[in-house]
Image: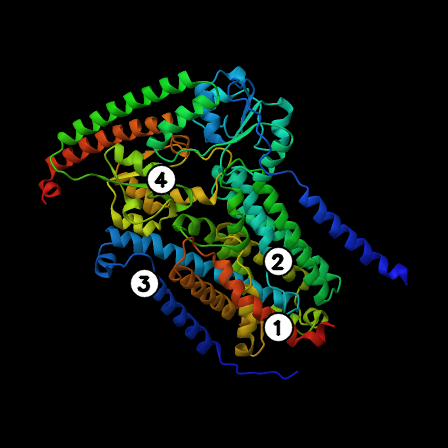
Amino acid sequence: MSRRNSPLRVAFVLVLSAIVLSSRALPLHADKIDTDKVVPQRIASLNLCTDQLLLMLVPRERIVSLTDWAARPESSYMAAAAVGIPVNYALAEGVLPQQPDLVIAGEYNDTAMLHLLRRLGYRVEVVQVPRDLAAARDFILRFGVLVGAAENARALVEKMDRELADLALQVRAIESHSLSTHKPLAAVYAPNGMTPGRHTVMTEILSRAGFRNLAAELGIDGYGQLALERLLVAQPDVLIYEATADAAGGGSIAHSYLQHPALQALSRRAPSVTLPPPLSECVGPMTVAAIARLVDTRRQWQKSSQHAAANNVDVTAP
Amino acid sequence: MKIKIHAISDLQLLPSLAALLCAVLIFALTQGPVALDWHAALTTPDSLHGVILWQVRLPRELLAIAVGATLGLAGAALQGLLRNPLAGPDLVGVTSCAALGAVLTLYSGLAAISWVSLPLGGLIGAGFAVAIIFLLSGQRAGVLTLILAGMAINAMVSSLIALALNFSKNPFAMSEIVYWLLGSVANRSYNDLSVTLPFMLAGWLLLLSSGRFLDALSLGEETAQSLGFDVNALRWRVVLGVALSVGAAVSVSGNIGFVGLVVPHLLRPWVGYEPRRLLAASALGGALLLLIADVVVISVPALREIKIGVITALIGGPFFLHLIYKNRNAFS
């Protein structure tokens, strides 16, 4: 009889012990070691955006590991600089071998893993990566303090400010030469028919380069899917492909969206430009590079539309 | 078992199915996120609305029709060949193997080298699966063996598809497992149609010309033999026909389930339970079912496109359960 009861008893003891153990579990935020005054010498990054900023601000001897995305040209603006730095795949096992004195994570990293790293006594800082240029300015300055490169961060922000002011002047000059006040409409198309709408850095990039964003005007918030039909009907002035130019290493259904004959016919009529994802995935100096590229497109559109206007009076007629 | 026969002649059945298909096609062309200016679309194909009608909507629906016809026809042919009412191309693992073949060619970059490699990958995968099923059933395997073998193949091949996508260098590959397991005809163009239609046509030809053989086979192998049919050669013709058509269809649409199972069942009473007559009727019926499913996909507003296989499975799943319930005595 007692034998028949024993599995039940064991189960009861197991449940009880689980309750006791969990009540004794360590708090989520283990006491932070106060290393703020010490300049971190062995920094690991678990987020593509912080990977790139780290490469811009800190000498590579002080970076012990980055995510596997950092060295890939199809995703990283700083790919060349990241080559040769150990890769952590954003996993605890990838972080541990180098014994970092500072681990930088984004808000979307696996919290269970960050918890584990903290329990093991590592200093983990979770940062919120910026989504627009104003936030990026502050972020870079604070990040500089965090990684012990405040001076470099200030220089980087000043350089961005100078370049942005120069680009704004260029756009104003282009627009002042324009015959009409029409602000050209840009449609951004990414694999799978995705398009960045309001509250994305792409809308800011476009607006600073003198374009309107079709997706934002259609009311798409964040990233959304845009039906090819709606894109065609909107008759955008320029078409921006947010994609790697070639499908190296195999195609995909997502990329086949960009090869639809109707879309290709449109891109023969309207000027089209390819903006590689590294320019719009994170916000910072790469954003300035993206704006510079689109200011060129804006200039070309101006020339071609005025050329068309000279040949065809109807185009400019209100 | 009581048998309902409300058979009508082919001259009545096929034109009515075709007429229905045309009506649904026209309705499907009116559906979409943009309200079409029909006058402009019909008179000037190069205009904006013309491009939307002729280059965006029509090729997609034509592909739905071709893929649906293939699945219906292949279902009818397999059910006739294996003399088994549960032998849909998806249940026995043919469509998932075709998807695996297409996945391997597409994500390895082979498909970029030559247009023919994508449907070729699909039909090699499909051929492999039909051959396995055919060899199994040749050993006088029952319904249960066939269904269980199909289950094993499907489970194995789905994992292999996931594995192949894992190793792809394309960052979008892994999320496309949904496409390959559930199917879609969204954003397809004439390129996809022209690449696969020759293979589908060849397969249809082989299957449609096997009607008399399937009729004879329904009376038993020996009878078919004594009636002068070269049973072995004709069986392989059906296998080849299924591999060609299903392989090509799946390589551009993914694995769309249940069409090949449901359609022959629905139409069987209408053709007087004759396997030969079931073929053409199932092709039209399959086209009709998939087109209707795509109309649902287009007209239901969703943030992300609904996969067409979701619709066919929601129709086909309960139907399949009903079929099992009805035949539960025969299976036990």
Label 2 and label 3: CA atoms lie apart by 38 Å
Q: Earlier in the sequence, mark 2 or mark 3?
A: 3
Q: Quadrant of the N terminus of chain A?
A: bottom right
Label ID, residue B323: 1
Label ID, residue B30: 3
Q: Earlier in the sequence, mark 1 or mark 3?
A: 3
> Could you tell me the amino acid type at mark 2?
Val
Contact flag, marks 3 and 4 (Cβ < 8 Å) = no
Residue that label 2 marks? B239
Q: Which one is in front, B25 or A277? A: A277
| Mark 2 vs mark 3: in front | 3
> Could you tell me the amino acid type at mark 1?
Leu
Q: Quadrant of residue A197?
A: top left
Q: Tag 2, which chain?
A: B
Label ID, residue B271: none
> Could you tell me the amino acid type at mark 4?
Thr
- Image coordinates of residue A105 in percent, x first then y, are 52, 32
- Image coordinates of residue A168 in percent, x first then y, are 23, 27
Label 2 and label 1: CA atoms lie apart by 25 Å
Label 2 and label 4: CA atoms lie apart by 52 Å
| Mark 4 vs mark 1: in front | 4
Q: Earlier in the sequence, mark 2 or mark 1?
A: 2
